[in-house]
Image (cartoon, rainbow, N blue to C red):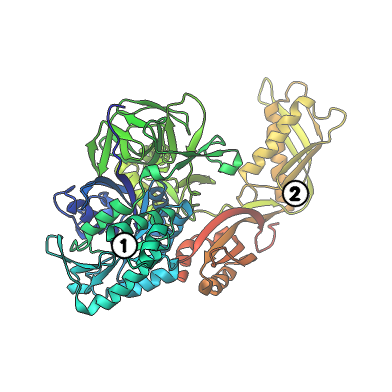
């Protein structure tokens, strides 16, 4: 080792509802620490972490961005914090998952005006599922209608009584400029520069604050035998001792502190920085998890083995590439966290997920879009590197020359909204596939597929896709128009029938000759079945496979209603051949002609695609969801209580009814519903067969 690792580095995911003040608070922390010369404003599009044009235009965060600061605590300890500012809009919940997958602590930001919102629930549930410790900060205390006590009650009702206020605002709205420190029982009085001095508590809050102090103290000492004995003997524990106990409780997930701050006035921001350094667990205090083997997309239970990895600087180099983003100047930028060992500029590593060999051309930390070069990164630290072409988001780099592994990540959120993409020009068409591949490599919640001849982009909502299309144009120079996704109807033959397929052509020299007699009918088990019943060599054996190929060609070309044909049984039982003029192509063409004739003779049944829709929602919204799905021709298979007390509704719904369902569902439930949509086969559409 040629340098000592930084022992106090922490990665903090700043998460919560859209509009709660996450970016403003991040900006205030960076400015208060001296990491940036001035604090920008979301309204002006001048903040460090909302640096993309799409974010500035909408005034909200749309992707995960990083900021870095160094902070000196009151005891002289110097800490480095990486702040991962995540969006709160539901269309970008995948970025919340990503931020929390690399976080040592989740800073859950809640507005003192709006309280607990759907985005708060999303962030909390993901942090809980990943085992990430939490600290709640109530922001926007300087705004009209701010009410800390109401919000604290909402938080405890939503997430449990283990949320403990360790700060109390002294005055709210325009009068918010002081904070009561519940642990030390002093008032922190702030000036216009965001710096504070200690004073005695105002008389009107002494009783309320002391009651909070007693409650928190008794809770904390109950988890420490030595402190408990001293407390019961009449010795009041010092604030520093309480903070150390609180840090252990936070790391164990048994306590969630609640503090208060304003990113606009900087009141409480310095104290928040102190608490982030003091309460966030060190990377060495918890292991990361990876999955060995099992394939890049397989779950751990599908052949992979989950392995705990200690954040040990002397260990094997292991790096989690958690986000990639296209940069107009340096190409692809990969955000990474070192899980083990040390990585240095010019190191060569292998991607354990994709198999690509990579060289770390230059390491740096990110300050929004600014690159701050570093020579090396130690276990537990977050940084970035450019031009890792074979390492998409959610992959691992290591020093081994073989083997396969991937990060242990929450399940990828499945797309629930889609749009077709139509290139604006021939040049756009030629470059669209490459650009979409790079876009999907950045964002695991985007999916590209085909419906008929249409290219379809799928994501988590309309804003998600709109931003993706804007990035296609701005970053990759590919311009597209969007439209609704065509419903992937199919058709099948209405009844069994017989048909003849014939090709007879003579134009000098060798001609084309083939005749096949076919029995064509529906295949109730689904799929395609080809049966050879020819006897006596009426159709020579070498042409039988050509007959099957011709039948498949006719199905793919579509039936009388213009849709691909499925669920068909084709039997060839007779035919004719010519010793000179017959060929594979002649029999293939004859078979296709015969199948088309059978479909026209018997008529076809239109089949519509179905989807299994699973909605998990608070019980008070269950009735509205059931009514809405019934109106979409939904058939219910399950209505039950989930483990978290919410109602889970599972229904089979025609895909034609689901084009905007995620948007309607958010409106119906106030954004409190979780939705998955999975293909569920086909069934006969309402109506009659076309004869």
Q: Earlier in the sequence, mark 1 or mark 2?
A: 1
Residue beneath the point at 70% across and 50% down:
600
Of 599 and 171, the residue lying toward us: 171
Q: Is residue 614 left or right of residue 149?
A: right
Residue 580, picture quadrant? top right
Residue beneath the point at 18% across and 47% down:
35
Q: Is residue 430 left or right of residue 573?
A: left
Q: Position of residue 197 (x, y in %)?
A: 14, 63
Residue 42 in sight from this viewpoint: no
Point out which mark residue 159 bears: none
Question: From mark 1 to mark 2, how far is it between C-alphas?
Answer: 74 Å
Q: Is residue 624 left or right of residue 156?
A: right
The answer to whether residue 216 is above or below residue 383 is below
Q: Outermost residue toward the front?
A: 233
Residue beneath the point at 25% across and 36% down:
329
Q: Badge 1 is on which residue?
A: 237
Q: Outermost residue toward the bottom?
A: 204
Please rate how many residues cluster around mark 2, counting C-alpha atoms within 10 Å: few if below 14, some from 14 to 19, many from 20: few
Residue 385, picture quadrant? top left
Q: Position of residue 682 (x, y in %)?
A: 65, 54
Label 1: which secondary element? loop
Residue 211, picture quadrant? bottom left
Q: Badge 2 is on which residue?
A: 525
Of 25 and 591, the residue lying toward us: 25
Q: Outermost residue toward the right?
A: 536
Q: Position of residue 614 (x, y in %)?
A: 57, 60
Q: Position of residue 47 (x, y in %)?
A: 22, 53
Label 2: which secondary element? loop
Marks 1 & 2, CB-CB < 8 Å contact: no
Front label number (1 vs 2)? 1
For the N terminus, the quadrant is top left
Q: Is residue 691 left or right of residue 90?
A: right
């Amino acid at each position: 080792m040629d340098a000592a690792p930084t022992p106090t580095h922490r990665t903090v995911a700043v998460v919560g509802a859209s509009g709660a003040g996450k970016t403003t608070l991040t900006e205030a922390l960076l400015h208060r620490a001296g990491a940036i010369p001035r604090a920008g404003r979301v309204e002006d599009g001048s903040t460090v972490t909302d640096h993309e044009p799409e974010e500035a235009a909408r005034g909200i965060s749309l992707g995960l961005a990083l900021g870095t600061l160094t902070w000196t605590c009151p005891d002289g300890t110097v800490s480095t914090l990486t702040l991962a500012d995540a969006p709160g809009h539901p269309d970008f919940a995948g970025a919340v998952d990503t931020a929390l997958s690399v976080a040592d602590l989740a800073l859950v930001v809640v507005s003192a005006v709006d309280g607990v919102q759907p985005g708060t629930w999303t962030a909390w549930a993901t942090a809980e599922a990943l085992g990430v410790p939490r600290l709640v900060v109530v922001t926007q205390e300087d705004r009209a209608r701010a009410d800390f006590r109401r919000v604290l009650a909402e938080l405890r009702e939503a997430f449990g009584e283990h949320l403990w206020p360790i700060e109390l605002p002294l005055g709210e709205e325009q009068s918010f400029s002081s904070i009561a420190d519940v642990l030390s029982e002093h008032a922190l009085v702030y000036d216009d520069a965001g710096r504070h001095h200690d004073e005695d508590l105002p008389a009107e809050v002494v009783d309320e604050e002391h009651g909070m102090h007693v409650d928190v103290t008794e809770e904390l000492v109950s988890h420490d035998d030595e402190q408990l004995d001293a407390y019961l003997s009449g010795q009041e524990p010092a604030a520093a001792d309480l903070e150390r106990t609180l840090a252990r409780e936070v790391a164990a997930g048994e306590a969630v502190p609640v503090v208060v701050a304003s990113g606009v006035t900087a009141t409480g921001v310095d104290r928040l920085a102190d608490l982030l350094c003091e309460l966030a667990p060190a990377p060495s205090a918890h292991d990361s998890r990876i999955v060995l083997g099992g394939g890049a997309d397989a779950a751990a239970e599908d052949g992979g083995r989950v392995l705990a990895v200690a954040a040990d600087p002397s260990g094997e180099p292991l790096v989690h590439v958690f986000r990639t983003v296209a940069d107009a100047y340096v190409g692809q930028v990969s955000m990474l966290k070192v899980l083990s060992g040390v990585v240095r500029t010019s190191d060569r590593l292998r991607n354990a997920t994709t198999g690509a060999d990579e060289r770390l051309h230059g390491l740096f930390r990110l300050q929004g879009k600014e690159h701050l070069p570093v020579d090396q990164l130690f276990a537990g630290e977050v940084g970035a590197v450019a031009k890792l072409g074979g390492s998409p988001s959610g992959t691992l780099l290591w020093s081994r020359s073989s083997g396969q592994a991937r990060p242990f990540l929450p399940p990828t959120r499945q797309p629930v909204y889609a749009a077709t993409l139509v290139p604006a020009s021939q040049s756009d068409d030629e470059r669209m596939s490459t650009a979409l591949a790079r876009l999907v490599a950045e964002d695991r919640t985007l999916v590209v597929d085909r419906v008929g001849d249409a290219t379809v982009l799928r994501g988590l909502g309309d804003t998600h896709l709109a931003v993706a299309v804007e990035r296609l144009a701005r970053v990759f120079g590919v311009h597209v128009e969007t439209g609704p996704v065509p419903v992937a109807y199919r058709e099948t033959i209405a009844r069994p029938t017989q048909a003849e397929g014939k090709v007879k052509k003579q134009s000098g020299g060798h001609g084309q000759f083939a005749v096949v007699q076919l029995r064509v009918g529906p295949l109730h088990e689904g799929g395609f079945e080809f049966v050879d019943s020819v006897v006596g060599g009426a159709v020579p054996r070498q042409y039988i496979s050509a007959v099957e190929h011709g039948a498949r060609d006719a199905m793919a070309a579509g039936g009388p209603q213009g849709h691909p044909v499925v669920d068909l049984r084709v039997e060839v039982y007779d035919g004719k051949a010519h010793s000179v003029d017959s060929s594979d192509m002649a029999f293939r063409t004859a078979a296709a002609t015969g199948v088309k004739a059978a479909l026209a003779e018997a008529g076809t049944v239109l089949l519509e695609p179905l989807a299994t829709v699973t909605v998990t929602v608070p019980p008070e919204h269950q009735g509205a969801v059931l009514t809405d799905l019934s109106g979409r021709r939904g058939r219910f298979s399950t209505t039950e209580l989930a483990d978290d007390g919410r109602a889970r509704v599972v229904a089979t719904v025609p895909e034609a009814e689901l084009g905007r369902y995620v948007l309607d569902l958010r409106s119906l439930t106030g954004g409190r519903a979780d939705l998955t949509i999975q293909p569920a086969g086909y069934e006969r559409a309402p109506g009659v067969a076309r004869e």
